[in-house]
Image: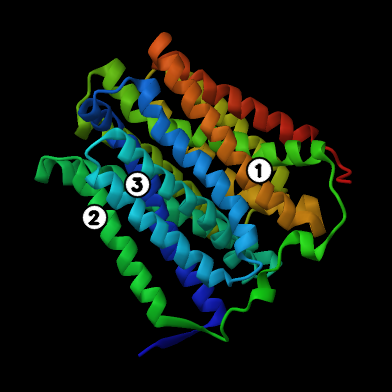
Amino acid sequence: MTLKLKHTSWSLVFAFVSMFILGLTDNIRGPLFPEVLHYFNLSSVRGSWSFATTSTASFLGAYLSVQFLRRYTLSSLLMTAVLFMGFGVLIMGKAPAFWIFIIGSFSIGISIGFMGVAQNLLVTESTTLEKKTRTLSALHATYGLASLIAPLLAATATNITGTWRTAFIIIGVLCFTYAIIQFLVKADPPFEVHQVSTAGQEDPIPVSKKAYMFIGGVFAFYVVAEIMIGTRLAQYMRSYYSMDLTRSSQYVTYFFLFMLIGRLFFAFKKISMSTKKQMNISLILSLILLILGLNSHPLILTIVGLSMAPFYPLSVAYISEATGIHARKFLTFAMGFQSLAVVSMHLGVGYLTDTLGLFYAFGVGIFALLLSLVCLNFHPKKLV
């Protein structure tokens, strides 16, 4: 027996629920990273391969999603993404050796690449132009809510059961529960392949590589900074302030709490200021707070979440506005470029942590925000 939901409602409901699961999966790894390093007896640079593998696979997933959508529907892509994620977290939660843990990281990466395309298309193709930015803010506020819960889940599950593996198993159960529900609830009218044809099919006009790199960099370099803070803040607090798992996880929680508050504000409040100006303010404030947090009280590092909050949904809307008929091309490229940039970040931060210390590794985040500022303000106006 199956249930039916109006097509638009189906798109929004399953985009939001899957985003919540993605947020849990993506952000539970940071607080547990020191536990994983200890369990497998790894250096920071070796442990960083788990994050780098996920990001590499995410790039592959973003690329393969375009090919997938030429034959299958958007709802099928989302289902496939959640199944890959479910298998990935279960493998990580059961891994007896680090190389098996890496296989789970790869599966999660494929899922993230699929989801990044599926969720953004579900929202952008189901909302009107005037509601798009606010709906995207709400979507990523859902990610923020999950990011807030993830460190609490990591610490609580570990403390109750005595093992870091439990949190991964819990998320695996959530993934397969979601998959069953999506199988039983159908969109009315159903999804069709032609509804999500690729940008290459819609618009064969070539775009300059410089435009791709600059506009893709607006999105990608910001994501590098956000993910670096989210995945390394717990390790930073444990290394420099001698905090345990619970206390260090609280700082990660504060970071994502501020991010959630900011995204909820932008989801409900209509801002008259231009998208580009809002993005510039977000980046500049984030730079200032990140530098202050590293040089004064670490609590300021958590407030960076508030200044960063609007940038991700704003950047998706900005790329759509700036690129017009080329929007699909640029959004897909930006997601792939983001994954490659994050791979480099994880490996670079791991190396700098082992050689100079995590304090200096946080400089990668400062550099990434500066690059995003440059790309935002100096990208080519002509795309072809």
Q: Nearer the viewer, residue 250 or 190?
A: 190
In the depicted view, which residue is nearer to us: 100 or 170?
100
Q: Pick the residue in front: 246 or 39.
A: 39
Label ID, residue 148:
3
Which picture quadrant has residue 190?
A: bottom right
**Residue to which mark 1 is pinned:** 278
Give the mark, 1 or 2, whose residue is nearer the N terminus: 2
| Residue type at tag 2 | Ile
Residue 120, image x, y percentages = 59, 59
The secondary structure type at the circle numbered 3 is helix
Identity, as a three-letter code, of the amino acid under mark 1? Gln
Residue contact between numbered discs 3 and 2, judged by CB atoms under 8 Å = no
Marker count (numbered): 3
Q: Which corner quadrant holds the N terminus?
A: bottom left
Q: Position of residue 9 (x, y in %)?
A: 51, 77
Return the x and y of residue 96 as percentages of the image width and height: 21, 39
Regarding residue 153, the answer to whether it shows in the image is no
The structure residue drawn at horizontal position 37% and vertical position 24%, both measured from the top left corner, is 46
Q: Which residue is mark 2?
A: 170
- Residue 202 against residue 294 in the figure, above or below: below
Q: Nearer the viewer, mark 3 or mark 2?
A: 2
In the rendered structure, the answer to whether residue 150 lies left or right of residue 143 reads left
Q: Residues within 10 Å of mark 1 (few under 14, many from 20)?
A: some
How packed mark 2 is, by other alpha carbons closer than 10 Å (few <14, some 14-19, many 20 or more), is: some
Residue at the spot 67% in from the left edge and 51% down from the top edge: 331
- Tag on residue 103? none
Q: Secondary structure at mark 2?
A: helix
SS for callout 1:
helix
What's the distance in space between the residues labelled 3 and 2, CA to CA? 16 Å
Residue 155 visible in the current orientation? yes
